[in-house]
Image (cartoon, rainbow, N blue to C red):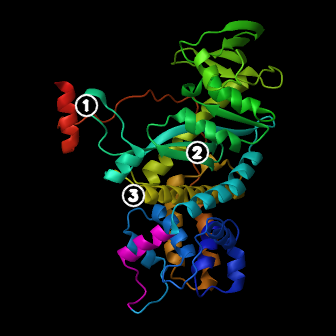
Amino acid sequence: MGGLGGWLASVATTANPGVAEQFREHIDPAWVDEALKATGTATVRHRRLPAPRVAWLVIAMALFRNRPITEVADKLDLALPGRRGPTASSSAITQARARLGEEPMEWLFGRTAQAWAHDSADRHRWRGLALYGVDGTTLRVPDSEENRTEFGVASGGHRGNSGYPLVRLVALMVLRSHLLAAVRFGAYAKGEHAYATDLWSGVPDDSLTIVDRGFVAAGVLVPLSRNGANRHWLTRGKKNLRWRTVERLGRHDELVEMKVSSQARKQDPTLPKTWIARAIRYHRKGYRPQVLLTSLLDPVAHPAAEIVGLYHERWELELGFDEIKTEMLEREETLRSRSPAAVRQEIWGMLIAYNLVRLEMEGVADEAHVEPTRISFVVALRLICDEWSWCAIASPGAIPRHLNELRASLQRFILPPRRSERSYPRAVKIKMSNYAKKRRPDQMTTNTSAAG
C-alpha cells in the first residue's frame, strides 16, 4: 500500500518519520514537489490548500467519484486549519485547482508512469520482448460552451451530434499488468492515428506493441519499427488489404510486400515505396478466418502459433478502459470539470489514481504468485478506497497493520484463470430509447436547416 501511504506521509501532520519513510514506496512526496517546481506552480505564500495537497485532491477525486469534492477534501483532512474550521469551501477548492493548473498533474503522471509501467513490462516479457498495447477510447465531459469549442462533438448523421462534448484518448498500456505507460488525449476531431504516433517515442526498445486493425497503415506502423531498436508491432489485417507474397514460411505463414500509398508518402516523405510484413492465417472455432500482420519476420524465433495466442491479449486494453470508465467513473455521464483546463487536470489525476490501484494489485499478485490480471480490480478499488478513508483518521501506529491486512484481503479475491475456450459474440444488450434526443436550440436549428 506504499503509493497511497506515500500520500498519507505527505499530508498527515501526525505521522512520525518512521512511518513516513515506510510509506514512500511508490510515490515519493519529492516527486510532487518536483512536479510543481518543474512547471512553476509551487506554492510560495501560505494557503489553506497548498499546491501539493491540491495535487493529491485531484487524484482522490477519481477514487471517491461518488462524493462531492468538498467532502473528499474534508474526509481526507487536506485543508490546513483556518479561522472557519478545517473544511474548505467549494469555491476555495475551485480556485486552488485553477492555481495548480494541469501541467503538474501531467508531469507527475509521466514521472510515475515511467517509473512503474516499464518496470512492470520488463518483468512480464514474451521471448525477450516487453508487451504493450495501443488503442483509443472517448470520455464524455460536461456540456459547456468552452468544452464544446475545445474538444468538439461526434457527428451522428441524421440522428444529430452527440449530446456531450467528447475527449479522444489513446493509451500505451502494459498488457500483462494494465499499467499505463503513456497517454495522449485532446480534441475528438483529431484521429487515433495522430495520437498514437505521438506515443511511439515512449515505446522502449526490445518490445512488441499490439494494436487493432484500425492502425494498419504504413504511416503509423513503419515509424514504430524504424525509429527504435528491435521494436515490433502486431495487428489484425483488413479485408481490403492487398499484398504480394514474397516467401512462404510455413503453412498459413508467409512474408508479404505491401505498397505505400502516394498520399501516405506525401504526408511523410521518409516512408518507403513498399513495406514488408509477415502474414499469419488462422481460424478459431466459431469465428471467421483471420489474418495477423506483424513485423516479427523470423518463424523460428517467433512461432506462428504463439503469435496467434499473443494477439488476443490485445483485449486487455479494452478491459483496462472498462476498469476506468465503468468502475472508477461509475459509468456516470461525464467527468466533473466544466472547463477544458480543469478537464485535462482531472483526467491526469484519474490516470495516476488508476495506475496506483493497478500497481498495488501487481504487488498483491507477486505475493500470491499469480498474474496481475488475476486480481479483481473491483475488489481492489473498493478496499483501497475504504482503507484510504480509514487511514485519514487513524493513528500512525495502526496504519501499517491495516495496510498489511488490506493486501491479505485482496489475496482472498483472486480471479480464476482465464478460459480462452469461452465465446461471447457481440450483441446489443440495451436498445436505443424510443424518445427523441434532447437537443440544444442551436443543434435543432442546424439539423432543421440541413433537412430542408
Residue 339: numbered disc: 3
Residues at marks 2 and 3, CA–CA distance in whole angstroms? 43 Å
The answer to whether residue 178 is visible is no
Magenta stretch encompasses residue 96: yes
Q: Earlier in the sequence, mark 2 or mark 3?
A: 3
Q: Which residue is mark 1?
A: 159
Magenta range is: 84-99
Q: Secondary structure at mark 1?
A: helix
Q: Residue at x 38, y 28 (%)?
A: 427
Tag count in the figure? 3
Q: Secondary structure at mark 3?
A: loop
Q: Are marks 2 and 3 in contact (CB under 8 Å)?
A: no
The answer to whether residue 430 is visible is yes
Q: Secondary structure at mark 2?
A: loop
**In the image shown, does 404 or 147 lie closer to the viewer?**
147
- x, y percentage for residue 71? 39, 74
- x, y percentage for residue 315? 56, 35
Horizontal side of 247 relative to 375 (left or right) equals: right
Q: Residue at x 61, y 65 (%)?
A: 39
- x, y percentage for residue 402? 59, 75
Q: Are marks 1 and 2 in contact (CB under 8 Å)?
A: no
**In the image shown, does 446 or 197 lie closer to the viewer?**
446
Residue 416: numbered disc: 2
Magenta stretch encompasses residue 107: no
Residues at marks 1 and 2, CA–CA distance in whole angstroms? 43 Å
Under mark 2, the amino acid is Pro
Dividing the image into 4 quarters, which one contains the N terminus?
Answer: bottom right
Q: Earlier in the sequence, mark 1 or mark 2?
A: 1
Residue that protrudes farthest toward the right in the picture: 300
Dividing the image into 4 quarters, which one contains the C terminus?
Answer: top left
Under mark 3, the amino acid is Ser
Under mark 1, the amino acid is Arg
